[in-house]
Image (cartoon, rainbow, N blue to C red):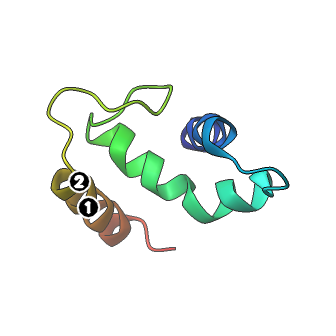
Amino acid sequence: MARAVTERVCLRKAHPGEDVAAWVEAHWYIAAADLEAGLIDENGDPLPGYTPARARDAVVDWLKRNPR
C-alpha cells in the first residue's frame, strides 16, 4: 500500500518529465512509516495530529525496525 500511496502523491505533485517509478522507489518507506503511525490516509493526505516532527520520528522508528 505504501508504494501506491507514494505514487498517488507523486502524480499529484509531479513535474513534467518526472520519473514516477524512481520517485516511488526513493520515497515509499516514508509513506509506509506515516501510514503505520496513523499520520496520513490512503491518499497520502495528512490526518489530524500530523506534524513534520511526528512524521520524522515515524520514519526514524520505521527504519530502525526495517533497515533498507
Relative vertical location of residue 43 with respect to residue 59 in this rendering, above or below: above
State the residue at coordinates (26%, 52%): 55
Relative to residue 20, is residue 49 drawn left or right? left
Relative to residue 9, is residue 22 drawn left or right? right
Of badges 2 and 1, nearer the viewer stands 2
State the residue at coordinates (64%, 36%): 4
Q: How far from the left and from the top, in percent, is residue 34?
A: 34, 45
Q: Estimate the spatial distance between the alpha carbons at disc 2 and disc 1, rounded to whole Å.
A: 6 Å
Where disc 1 sits, the SS reads helix
Q: Are marks 2 and 1 in contact (CB under 8 Å)?
A: yes
Residue type, mark 2 in image: Pro
Where disc 2 sits, the SS reads helix
State the residue at coordinates (69%, 38%): 11
Relative vertical location of residue 41 with respect to residue 22 in this rendering, above or below: above
The quarter of the image holding the N terminus is top right
Q: Which mark is residue 10?
A: none
Seen from the viewer's position, the closer of residues 62 and 57 is 57
Q: How far from the left and from the top, in percent, is residue 37?
A: 26, 41
Q: How far from the left and from the top, in percent, is residue 57?
A: 20, 61
Seen from the viewer's position, the closer of residues 12 and 30 is 12
Relative to residue 55, is residue 23 drawn left or right? right
Residue type, mark 1 in image: Arg
- Report the number of discs: 2
Rate crowding at label 1 as few (under 14), some (14 to 19) or many (20 or more) other CA atoms within 10 Å: some
Q: Mark 1 — residue?
A: 56
Q: Mark 2 — residue?
A: 52
State the residue at coordinates (39%, 26%): 41
Relative vertical location of residue 61 with respect to residue 6 in this rendering, above or below: below
